[in-house]
Image (tube, coloured by chain):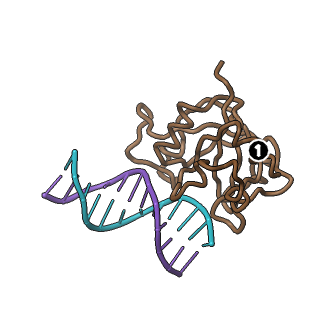
Chain colours: A brown, B purple, C cyan
Amino acid sequence: MAAMRYWLMKSEPDVFSIDDLARAKVEPWTGVRNYQARNFMRDGMGVGDGVLFYHSSCEVPGVAGIAEVASAAYPDPTQFDPKSEYYDERSTRDDPRWMLVDVAFRRKLKRVVTLAELKAQPGLDGFPLLQRGNRLSVLPVTKAQWQAILALE
DNA sequence: GCCAACGTTGGC
DNA sequence: GCCAACGTTGGC
């Protein structure tokens, strides 16, 4: 069994928030269409890994809750659905291009730990989220970063 | 709404 | 294989 890892996953709360995940309990993380993010889900994640649920593109961007990886990677069904905004005509069921994992709700933070706070935290130098121009929606977090972020709650 | 940063596409 | 054009992300 691989050691547990930690991740951060971005979601726009207008589309899918931590409260939506709390209601859903478990949600397939559809719509990732970036190869690096896909590779993290496909090759890096294991069931039980910790996930920081990050709200992006909103009034107060920041970490809003904690979730966990709840499945191995499998093909994102939306890539096969012509009616989906995530449809990819280049993808086939024999050779799917996009993968996802299921994400399970663990808890909501007592308050949102904001991006501004993360930037001000000395222990988070080198955290990929804070690096210039980073747009990855799924990214790895070290145990030290995980602890430093949750210490701000 | 703006715009910097970056990934992808496609012509050559 | 290069690289310009284009589209998207996401903070502000």
Q: Nearer the viewer, residue A38 or A71?
A: A38
Give the farthest residue toward the front.
A122
The image quadrant that residue A102 belongs to is: top right
Picture quadrant where residue A120 is located: bottom right
Give the x, y percent position of residue A32: 54, 47
Q: Which residue is mark 1?
A: A66
Please indicate whether residue A89 sits to the left or right of residue A63 in the image. Answer: left
**Three-letter code, disc 1:** Ile
Q: Chain of mark 1?
A: A
Q: Secondary structure beneath disc 1?
A: strand
For image coordinates 66% across by 18% down, the residue present is: A1
- Name the residue at 48% across, 40% down: A98
In this rendering, position of residue A4 left or right of residue A139: right
Q: Residue furthest right?
A: A110
Q: Residue at image x 68%, y 35%? A: A69
x and y percentages locating residue A141 in the rendered image: 64, 41
Disc tally is: 1
How packed mark 1 is, by other alpha carbons closer than 10 Å (few <14, some 14-19, many 20 or more), is many
Q: Position of residue A107 (x, y in %)?
A: 82, 44
Question: Going 63% across and 50% down the picture, which residue do you hit?
Answer: A125
Q: Is residue A101 above or below residue A60?
A: above
